[in-house]
Amino acid sequence: MADLLIELFSEEIPARMQPRARDDLKKLVTEGLVQAGLTYASAGAFSTPRRLTLSVEGLTAESRPVREERKGPSTTAPQQAIDGFLRSTGLTLDQLERRADKKGETFYAVVEKPGRAAADIVAEVLETTIRTFPWPKSMRWGAGTLRWVRPLQGILCLLSDETGAHVVPLTVDGIEAGNTTEGHRFMGNGRFTVSGFDDYVVKLKRARVVLDTAEREAAIWQAAQNLAFAAGMEVVPDAGLLNEVAGLVEWPVPLMGRIADAFLSLPPEVLQTSMKEHQKFFSVRNPKTGRIEGFVTVANIEAPDGGATILKGNQKVLAARLSDAKFFWENDLRVAKAGMGEWVEGLKSVTFQAKLGSQADRIARIAALAREIAPLVGANADDAEQAAKIAKLDLRSAMVGEFPELQGVMGRYYALEAGEKPAVADAARDHWRPRGESDGVPTEPVSVAVALADKIDTLTGFWAIDEKPTGSKDPFALRRAALGVIRLVLGSLYRSGLLPVLDKAEAKNIFATLKLRESQKQELLEELSGVTDEMSHSKIGEIRRTATSMSRVMIDAKSGANGANVAVSAEVLDLLSFFHDRLKVFLKDQGIRHDIIDACLAMPGNDDLTLLVKRAEALAAVMKTEDGANLLQGFKRANNILSQAEAKDGVEYSFGADLKFAETDEERALFAALDKAEATITPAMKAEDFATAMAAMAALRQPIDAFFTAVQVNSDNQVVRRNRLNLLHRIRAVCSGVADLNRIEG
Amino acid sequence: MSEAPTTPRSFQEIILRLQAYWASKGCAVLQPYDMEVGAGTFHPATTLRSLGSKPWAAAYVQPSRRPTDGRYGENPNRLQHYYQYQVIIKPSPPDMQELYLGSLAAIGIDLGLHDIRFVEDDWESPTLGAWGLGWEVWCDGMEVSQFTYFQQVGGHDCKPVSGELTYGLERLAMYVMGVDHVMDMPFNDPSSLIPLKYGDIFRQTEEEYSRHNFDGASTEMLFQHFKDAEAECERLLAFDPVDPKNGKTIIMAHPAYDQTIKASHLFNLLDARGVISVTERQAYIGRVRALAKQCADAFRRTEAGADL
């Protein structure tokens, strides 16, 4: 047994790349060793800004000898075949074994590979690992050809066993492996020799390097908390920042400073973002005031003045940064207090998308849409419209120009300054959500209305100009937007079909792509907003066509040119099926199979996502029961017999089956069961109580099974046969009202 | 690195110390390039000389112009005209980081007292078609230099790789001397017979150029000059490499590159004048890059840019 220690010493490795690099080093080396026939007990990888280290314990001293046996051709096979076998094995004829078997005698090639010393294998594996290391970005340096994340300066590679520690002989692009390393760049004391992992860790620490990132993180967090606590303050936790900072230092020395009073009036998000993004400072909060009043910076050196110079320098840099932020904030406040009109004007000249017009055009569309969606989600229409109008104004603010990640957060502050209602201001912050899968959805109705309107406008817009996601390309994050709509709908009161909303939004985006006079556009939009009834689709189609004919030049708008018979434009239906695809992915993550969803998608009203999901959940639940699974078989059997008969006879057996032609008890029982099921299912479906409807459907399993066991459908008596086929039709009809069971597999 | 560093007393002393230091490390101390450039990297001693396999080591001060950064001399550390100190060594020596740290010590930064950090920062110049990996160097949280290993310039792989250092001189000097406003920084020794501050030399020019860059420059003329520079660059490169007067092969890579530098600066001025839209911006950058690339191609065919 031996222990292996590898250190790849380089110039500073970016902090964000270290975690992956540790995993990759461990994986590549250990897999390489195992593949070459070695085994090991345990392995651990470590990183500091200047080194990647791997320790492997309990490594076998040599690989097991391998005996490989290959069966060749028969000894009587043509010479050509035998030559081919010799070539492929690299052996000569007298090295082959002849073995007798049933068919006669066959050649066998037996290759014995002796065990190899661990050192040879390690050298080989490490060189391959270094040369093929999957850095997200790598570089060359000097006159060499090797690639590493930054110049690789040294390799330490040591195998130690009872006889002592031995350097594994290895040279990569002129860098020769050895048994020495160095410590901290400024506090270390030259190179030193190590004899194994424990010795390495101890000597590194003596040379002011903490090898383990987790240990550095813990030390930083502990010291930061102590500093804050001593001053009656608390550190704002930030795991991502802690991880990054731990990757920037070998010997962490946290230092705490105060933010100058002049900056304390800045919103906490601004202070936190500025300090974190620019300076990698932790924020320190005063629990009494709830304000961010201090910071912790983590130095990489123990300075003789206790860090006073370092702290002073950092404080100075921070002051410069915060002066900028304060300048932005005060400028923005001035605009906000004046009602944000400057930003409204400004957004008119900002292009959202070349074909879809300016940000101002986009906001107008979203506002109109938010107004329409508002009643569907329980929001006040005026509030929703107003919220949509102001929600994106912060895009023009200086602060968001500097810190794009504060978009929304600043919008809320500025909206409040402009005198907007809290619900309206909140929508400025929350309408961006969900920003990703892990982000929650807003629940406040005004925010929901604007969030939906925003995302639906984006989707219909890009659909209108045919910029849909393809394969891995989704530059406008439309999949995320669609998933956002799905989650917003499911999380809110929204309980109507999506199609009318999509249709109208799409029409507005089409108008945007057309060259229309302002008066024409207004006329069209007014007509569009008047559409509310059941006839919406054909009416919208009509308006769309009017728009197209008004437009002198059509720019890339494919819709509107559809034939007069198309009620909903093909683009809108295509978009709906895009939603359905996203919904499938979404439900699959929740454990609902795609065929179950397909069975529900085939039902009418499939643009009502809430209904769709309720139906799918109920169907998935019932299909997990024994009754459900068996009912599916019964249904398919009934449907098959019926379909074949219908195809053969060229008629549809949908005429009501009559109980008086029933001959057996099982037949009569099925009549009764269907009556009973129908009596339950019809009102349950109307009430969207899918669980009850599906349970009633599943209860048909027993009578259907019994029917098929006892009854021959294709009776010689044509009257009886027809009646039975009509009875099967009732099974189909009853089940098809719930879901399209044909689409379920199994 | 261990000698006790003393704090320089003036801006020029920092420059002089850097010159002396890099001269002692074997760099040819060049003078600034005599054209308007946005950064020291544009000096042909860096862009062109980083191409080809011939060893190279140079250091120089380069006045740099960023028309959009003009603040009429009021901002404590933003200027439309400032100085960069540039070091370029090809191939990058194995101890380039140590050499750099030595230069910090030389200008009075006590490496035991300050917190020096190499923080990931990948460099890219879309107008030069160039990129490299390296760091921004922090001293107590303040960026004091850029450190880059050139990987590509003008679309050509850098083989061998050059190591490049860029010091923002005003910012660095202000930090070292503890000055809060650039205009208050002593330019020469404060005990001189005629002590001059940075502001005595540059406050007025910052005002004048700020007005010029934002409002004064004729955009019509700038657009025309951009076109002219672009056409001239391509025209010069289209010459037969063999000069009929003497039968020698003379490729006019440097004169053509001068036109690229011009085009780049004209673009920066147009940008400051606010007459280039977001979409046009990319197109202009692409046009300058195309010139830079052609110059790099041409330089590679010359003796100085060849592979040995």
Image (tube, grey):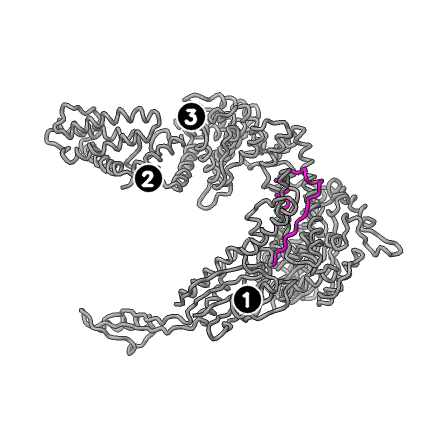
Above or below for B123 versus A40: above
Image location (x, y in percent) of residue A23: 48, 57
Residue lying farthest to the right in this orientation: B193
Cα gap from disc 1 to disc 2, whole angstroms: 58 Å
Asked if both marks, 1 and 3, belong to the same chain, the answer given is: yes
The location of residue A418, given as percent across then percent down, is 64, 28
Q: Are marks 3 and 2 in contact (CB under 8 Å)?
A: no
Q: Is residue A481 magenta?
A: no
Q: Answer few, some or many: residues within 10 Å of disc 2's Cα (few below 14, many 20 plus, some between 14 and 19).
A: some
Of marks 3 and 2, which one's residue comes earlier in the chain?
3
Please state which of residues A582 and A377 is positioned toward the viewer in this rendering: A377
Q: Which residues are magenta?
A: A251-275
Work out how far the residue at label 3 is from the one at label 2, CA to CA, in angstroms: 29 Å
* Quarter of the image with the N terminus of chain B in it: bottom right
Taking depth in this image into account, of A204 and B13 the one nearest to the observer is A204
> Badge 3 sits on which subunit?
A
Residue hosting label 2: A595
Q: Quadrant of residue A321?
A: top right
* Marker disc for residue A200: 1
